[in-house]
Amino acid sequence: MNELKKGLYFSPDDGAGDGNSGDEKPADKQEKTPLEWDAFHGSLPEEAQNLIATHEGGLKTALETERDSRGQLEKDLKDVAGELEKGSDAQKEVLKLADKVAAGDRKIDFYEDAQKAGISNFKLAYHIAKDDDLFDKRGNVNFEKMKESYPELFTKKKAPPADGGEGTGGGLPGEKVDMNALIRKKAGW
């Protein structure tokens, strides 16, 4: 007679032996939470966080240097315009260039502040801020007023699911292959 060997047996119909009591979702079926920067950054080892902080510091320094040079360029253009004949075409062109530099600075500052405010579409938000006159005299934007009028601009972006390698066997990305279904199909059940 055949004796049963000690071991783990499962039935393809009742899910026994898959390590799942039936009440819990398998690890591959559990809902995935979106990846957010603060949670991700906080989970990194301290060495990695310091590396990112150092790199970020270098980028901030480069940004400040660029801002300073653009501010100096605007000042120099206005100084040159002041030396030109009043009302001349040359003066008008130089003042127009100075205004373009100032507008570029204002846009850069807006993008930085918009990121901190949680804006999801910077370009659209900038056009709205200009059209709705949400800039004050110093170039700051009233994000509270913008949020009241356009709350959809303040939605959080979620990272797409990271399952790009899954589903390469013909199924949809993220679709899991059920081995029992494959066996039944081959067996003609």
Image: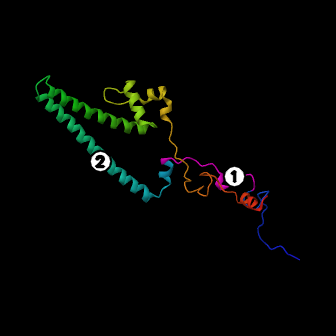
Q: Residues within 10 Å of mark 1 (few under 14, many from 20)?
A: few
Q: Quadrant of the N terminus?
A: bottom right
Residue name at image x 48 percent, y 56 percent: 44
Residue 137 shown left or right of residue 165 in the figure? left
User: Of the residues under marks 1 and 2, which one precedes in the sequence?
Assistant: 1
Please name the residue that numbered disc 2 is placed on: 62
Q: Which residue appears farthest toward the top when viewing the image? A: 87
Residue 42 shown left or right of residue 188 in the figure? left
Element marked by disc 1:
loop
Is 38 drawn above or below residue 179 in the view shown? above
Extent of the magenta region: 21-37
Please name the residue that numbered disc 1 is placed on: 25
Q: Position of residue 70 (x, y in %)?
A: 24, 39
What label does residue 142 carry, if any?
none
* In magenta stretch: residue 25: yes
Residue name at image x 36 percent, y 35 percent: 110
Q: Quadrant of the C terminus?
A: bottom right
What is the chief secondary structure element of the magenta stretch?
A: loop
Total residue callouts: 2
Is 152 drawn above or below residue 179 in the view shown? above
Q: Amino acid at mark 1?
A: Lys
Q: Position of residue 75 (x, y in %)?
A: 19, 34
Q: Which residue appears farthest toward the bottom when viewing the image? A: 1
Q: Position of residue 123 (x, y in %)?
A: 40, 35
